[in-house]
Amino acid sequence: MYNMLILLKLLKKPWWWILLLCVPGVNALVLAIINVNVHFAFGKRKFQDVILAVVAPHYVFGAAAFQEKSKWVGPLVWKNKKEKGMIREWGDALLFAVVAAGIIRGFFFEAFTIPTGSMEKDLLIGDYLFVNKVAYGSKLPQTPVAVPFFHNNIPGTYIPCYLEWFKMDYHRLPGYQDVERNEIVVFNYPAGDTALLGNMNGSELQGHNYHQYLKDEALFLAGGDRNKLASDYNLYLNQARVNLIEKNKISHMNLKTAGWIERRTDKKENYIKRCVGIPGDSLQIIDGRLIVNGEDAYLDTNAQYNYRLRPNKTTVIRDNFKNKYKEKYDINPTDWRSSDRYGRSYNGDFVVSIAQKHIEEIRASKQFDSIWIPWKKSGYYVEDEMESRAQYLNIFPNHKLTEHWTEDNMGPWYLPKAGDEIELNEFNIAFYRRAIESYEKNKVSIESDGIYINDEIAKTYKFKMNYYWMMGDNRHNSLDCRMWGYVPEDHVVGKAAIIWFSKDNEPNHERIRWERIFQLAH
């Protein structure tokens, strides 16, 4: 550090640049600037000299030290703006803006857009909010050398915007609070460690859950027979891996992919949900009712469920009717569904996502004979003839052992906390294997004589990290922990802070939602 301070003094740069060298990501840019200025100080001031200083800094210092023709001419100092020129002046301003914005975005606040309706009606599609990264402690970048302001790929391409070979382990700066139950949290998508690159019918598949495609492919190879799949699960799973990874194809979708890419934790897709379970909690869901440590969990009045509505004889569901419900209850016209995903008619009924605060008023309107929630009871995915895809594999822990679980009826299960030492058995290893193997970087195998961790038989396991449970407020239209399990602490990005802009993009109802701007996200 002292050596760098002397170098900064020689180059006539401010001493506090050394602080920027302590910031991962920003330090790579600042170091490149210093290298260029060293080259300048030895009279190397052509465009090709700048490029050389950036791509081969060690050569620059070697040449300065050992080439006889190298002479110190002093740092490049502009006497006035006119001498510096407009291009260089704006270049310096832009460079400072990139560095400053990179620090703010990486360690303090980052803008986030709500792309789906999983948090309706608390956070709406078209909301733009700031995420507070300081609250829980800012994460140091695990892939610090990256193109500024891009998350994982250069837009419109499959080209990563970061250097994969330069990596750092997980570290987090101190925050001023822990993740608390019922807070809205932004986190890295846990199942996004292996991302699918491809396009189907014009729809981008990038970032989708590889693990679910793998299970679906295994079921396809088993002839769609759930019992046959269960009888030799590992055999079909290994065959599916060959298809997906080596052959880059998904047979059950007749799709040739563009390949798969592994992603570091900080480069996985960002998701936003409500934290409903914290480390040490025991959870269960009974008919959609979340129970935490034996008590009913908090449910926001804006939370939505899919209700089935049976119109009475005088109610006609047309565009005008839907528009009135949009104006009064903020129910989008596109949310009225008259058939299920298999095309089976609801026989005149509609399934509509409705916020809890409106349901009694809608009942009182007497425009519907019946209003109820069609809960998926335990065993639904095993007993329903149309559920031939072994849909229970989509429900955590994605295993035959819990085939009777559904998103509305599942559990109980436990959220590990750092330091917990849990006894392992053939049942609970289904819940903890991914955490032990993928998140805490251990080798896990299940043999006839027991469970092996790092090639040693293990009766217990002591967890290194805290784990959380995240769910969307739009309970029947949310991809959340019910599908892929725990969120580790190293995936937590920050706390939803404030909505700075909001726009309704519903067809024929487009407008800026002025009433939501500068509201707190809660």
Image (cartoon, rainbow, N blue to C red):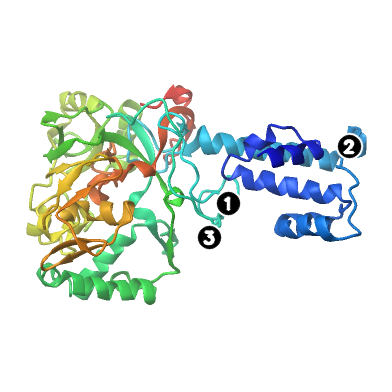
Q: Quadrant of residue 246?
A: bottom left
Kind of residue sitting beneath label 1: Val
Task: Please indicate whether residue 251 sits to the left or right of residue 316 in the image.
Answer: right
Kind of residue sitting beneath label 3: Trp
Name the residue beneath numbered marker 1: 145
Residue at the spot 85% in from the left edge and 47% down from the top edge: 41
Label 2: how many residues lie within 10 Å, few (<14), some (14-19) or many (20+)? few
From the image, which quarter does the N terminus lie in?
top right
Secondary structure of the residue carrying tag 1 is: loop
Secondary structure of the residue carrying tag 3 is: loop
Q: Could you tell me how far apart the alpha carbons at marks 1 and 3 are, in whole angstroms? A: 9 Å
Secondary structure of the residue carrying tag 2 is: loop
Above or below, 257 relative to 119: below
Q: Residue 489 placed where, x, y %?
A: 34, 41
Label 1: how many residues lie within 10 Å, few (<14), some (14-19) or many (20+)? many
Q: Quadrant of residue 161?
A: bottom right
Q: Quadrant of residue 367?
A: top left
Kind of residue sitting beneath label 2: Trp
Name the residue beneath numbered marker 3: 165
Q: Which mark is residue 78?
A: 2
Task: Let me know if residue 147 appears in the view.
Answer: yes
Q: Could you tell me how far apart the alpha carbons at marks 2 and 3 are, in whole angstroms? A: 38 Å
Q: Could you tell me how far apart the alpha carbons at marks 1 and 2 are, in whole angstroms? A: 30 Å
